[in-house]
Every structure is written in C-alpha cells, then in structure tokens.
Image: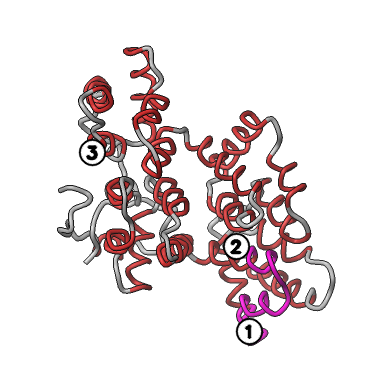
Amino acid sequence: MSASSREMGPSLTPEILSHLGLANKTAAWGTLGTLRTFLSFSVDKDVQRLLKAITGQGVDRGAIVDVLTNRSREQRQLISRAFQERTQQDLLKSLQAALSGNLEKIVVALLQPAAQFDAQELRTALKASDSAEDVTMEILATRTPPRLQECLAAYGHHFQVEAEDDIKSKTSGILRDLLLALAKGGRESYSGIIDYNLAEQDVQALRQDEGRSTQGPWVLILTQRNPKHLTRVFEQYQRRTGQELDEAVRTRFRGDARAALLSLASVIRNTPLYFADKLHRALQESEPNYQVLMRILISRSETDLLSIRAEFKKKFGKSLYSSLQDAVTGDCRSALLALCRAEDI
C-alpha cells in the first residue's frame, strides 16, 4: 500500500494500546518503533535502485522514499557506504542535488547517523532564541544515556565547541541549570525497589523550597531521580499539598523556566504522550511545522512511535496518520506517512 494512499492501512490499535506508556520496553516483534530492520535487505539492490532513481529520466522520488523509509538507520548507513564504494559518489550529496525542500531535509536526516542528527538539531535550537528551551529540552530529556553522550560528542566534533558551553552562553537561570544537569546524563536508573523515605524527603524539599530564591531542589530532583521514583513524588506532592506539581510550577516560575519544568514533568510522566502533544501542536499551526514533524517521526521511528500513535489517537480522537494526511502537502508527505506507517482505527 502506498504511504500516501487515503486507504487505511492495517489496524495496529489492539497491539499498540496493550503497550501504552511502555516506551522503554519492547513488543513481541522487538520494538515499539514503526520502522524495523528490513529482513530481505540487499545492499546491492538498494544501491542500484537509488542510483537509477537519481540518474534516470527524471528523479524517482517514490523509489527514494520507499528505500529510505523501509530500512533501519543501520541499514541506511550500510547503503550509504556501499553507494560510495560502488559509484565513487557520496549518496547524501547525490540525493541533495536531486531533491529540494522538505523532502531533501527528510532524506538528509534519514541518512545522517543518529548522533549527528541530534547534534545538528541541538545546535540549531541553541542558535535560535525562540526554540532553545523547547528543542533542547526535548533532546536532552528524551534520549537514552548512550545516545545522549554520542550526540554531545558529535556536537563537539562537528562544531568545535562543547554543547555545555553553548548552553551556558545561550541560556540563563534555572533553564540553564536544568539543561546542564540533563546534559551530564546523571539520571539514576530504576533499581526495582521503591525508596519511600527518599520520595517523602523529595516532596518535603520541594515544599520547603517554596518562596525561596534558590531552585536547587527542583533541578536536582527532576534531573537526577529515575522516572518511577518521580511519579511517586508527583503523587505524594499532590496528596500533601492538594495541588498538582504542574500547578505549583505555574505559580512559582515564569517564562522559559516554567516551560522547561512543565516539559520535563511531561516527559517523566509519559514520554509517548509528550511527543503526541508536540506532534498535535505542530499539525495545528496555520502551516504545519515540518521541522518538528520530521524530527519526532525520524528520531522515534525505531523506538516508540507506535506508543506515540496510540497516545495521539487516545487523546485527540483522530489517528496521527489521518492527521498527517489532512495537514501535510508537498513532496515530503509520502515520506512522513511512510514513517508513521499505518492507520489506527
């Protein structure tokens, strides 16, 4: 079935819904991503198909999209290297010369190593004052520790400056403290044991800090504790104060600090729902925010996009696939739909 077809694909809803909220776990087929390793992978056939797509009479965009959105990132890297060996040409540069606009951006992102893609998005965000908090928080708070460290290493290598230095120069206050703490990747892992005493201590620390000028406890607790522990802290905070943690954040903080803390709390509670909300906002703009759509669909396609789709349908009453069909236009439409993969009934 063509990804851009209006016909609805196979329903994955029962399987998806059974795994809601389990973004860090695996399903029966090994992943909650929509894009998996292509079992009939032949690097030679893919190289020949891509070569034909860009050297034939007219650019075959459909073939390019079909190959790149049906191979894992590791397989795409193999294709890129094989293309260079067989043709003495750089696949990325060849495709950039053949394509333009948003489709070109998607293809570039698909062919980049994950760490390089994240590093570029992080750099762009830190250079743009209007998106520093949103995108930087997204990347630093949702990437696994190994992937985050790879991203930061790629950042330093490609831009000849450490990400931490750019964070220090481009942000300030509690936002800077939050981002720097997240960049250290020091969040505790879940041991399987709930420390009720520590949870109570954290609640008291957050309550006692109310009205003071220091935000130390908020930064320490929200960036260091594991998500399961923090979920209990959020629940106990509400029981002790009669106020949800989000309400306390809105009352106490302003501007970027407030937005960053609310985003971080959302990630901690339910990462797939956090991304579903971001996708919905991107689709609700007068012109879809293609950069947000591209970044999320590509970065989550091999991890938890099925869970994100399920949360999207559950909250907004309409599937992500249908929402993309209705809002997205142009050459990139088929690529975004292919990454989303299927309809949810």
Q: Amino acid at mark 2?
A: Leu
Q: Which residue is mark 3?
A: 62
What number is the disc on residue 264?
2
* Residue 221 place in picture, x, y as percent: 69, 62
Q: Amino acid at mark 1?
A: Gln
Q: Residue at x 23, y 30 (%)?
A: 58
Query: Which residue matches tag 1?
Result: 243
Q: Closest to the observer: 94 or 80?
A: 94
Range drawn in magenta: 237-260
Mark 3 closeness class: few <14, some 14–19, many ≥20 residues within 10 Å: some
Please name the amino acid that badge 3 sits on: Gly
Answer above or below: position of 188 versus 246: above
Task: Locate the C terminus and report the quarter of the image it occupies.
Answer: bottom left
SS for callout 2: helix
Which secondary structure lies at badge 3? Answer: helix
Residue 5, x across and y down, in percent: 18, 53
Q: Is residue 304 left or right of residue 37?
A: right
| Residue at mark 3 to residue at mark 1: CA–CA distance | 52 Å
Q: CA distance from mark 2 to mark 3?
A: 38 Å
Q: Is 42 placed above or below 203 here?
A: above
Badge 1 local density, few (<14 within 10 Å), some, or many (20+)?
few
* Quadrant position of residue 158: top right
Would you say 144 lies left or right of 283 here?
A: right
Q: Nearer the viewer, residue 32 or 129?
A: 129
Q: Residue at x 56, y 69 (%)?
A: 231
Marker disc for residue 55: none
Residue 18 is at least partly visible in this image: no
Instruction: Tell me, yes or no, if residue 204 can be seen here.
Output: yes
